[in-house]
Amino acid sequence: MSDLSRQSARFPLLVLVCSTLLWGCSSIDNASSKLVSVITPYKMDVVQGNVVTKEQVAALKPGMPRSQVRDILGTALLTSVFHADRWDYVFTLKSQSTAPQSRKVTIFFKNDAMEKVEAEDLPTEAEFVATLKSMPLSGTLPPMEATAESLKAFPVAPKPVPAVGSTAVIPANYPPLEPAGK
């Protein structure tokens, strides 16, 4: 066989191999796109704002001063100069396992005393904590309480004995913080 006939015989074989490789690449691309659509990246839970629960709102009573309301609910996320007698508590939760949640609680004051509360349907503390668990725990949890038998296994700590003659003398008056010349 001449060189020309060998090269002409190799050409269709080369075209067949290249087309097979290109077809294989496209099928791999299709398979990888299907695989990527099944596997999703981890998305972190995003909690923003003040979490206000049913128990917290139930603790509020008309006539409470602002300081007590702040102690129960925390500092309001939104306070306006134009609406000084109104505090807004806004909350959003974006989670991979649940639909996005948004809640708003508005506290109205009259003469620095709480007048009324406007709130959407709020969860209890247990319901809110349940929405934060994006992955279920596997296995059994250890007991969170020690029994009398398990406490006996620990050694008893010795009681501290006060040192003899080492009583601290507390001064009756203290020196001034600044020199008298100033």
Image (cartoon, rainbow, N blue to C red):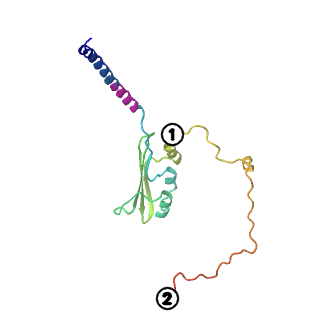
Work out which residue is located at the far front of the displayed protein and give it.
2
Choose between 11 and 106: the one closer to the eye. Answer: 11
| Rendered position, 3 above or below 35 | above
Question: Residue sitting at 39 percent across and 62 percent down?
Answer: 85
Point out residue 88 in the picture as x, y percentages from the top left corner: 40, 56
Magenta span: 25-37
| Rendered position, 28 above or below 51 | above
Q: Main secondary structure of the magenta part?
A: helix
Say whether residue 166 is left or right of residue 31: right
Q: Earlier in the sequence, mark 2 or mark 1?
A: 1
Viewport quadrant of the N terminus: top left
Q: Is residue 65 visible?
A: no
Question: Residue sitting at 68 percent across and 75 percent down?
Answer: 168
Point out residue 54 in the picture as x, y percentages from the top left corner: 50, 50
Q: Is residue 38 visible?
A: yes
Choose between 170 and 104: the one closer to the eye. Answer: 170
Point out residue 44 in the picture as x, y percentages from the top left corner: 44, 44
**Amino acid identity at mark 1:** Met
Choose between 20 and 38: the one closer to the eye. Answer: 20
Say whether residue 15 is left or right of residue 89: left
| 2 or 1: mark nearer the eye | 2
**Amino acid identity at mark 2:** Gly
What residue is disc 1 on?
135
Element under label 1?
A: loop
Q: CA distance from mark 2 to mark 1?
A: 68 Å
Let me know if residue 59 is in the magenta part. no
Mark 2: give few (<14), some (14-19) or many (20+) Cα within 10 Å: few
Q: Quadrant of residue 42?
A: top left
| Rendered position, 101 above or below 13 | below
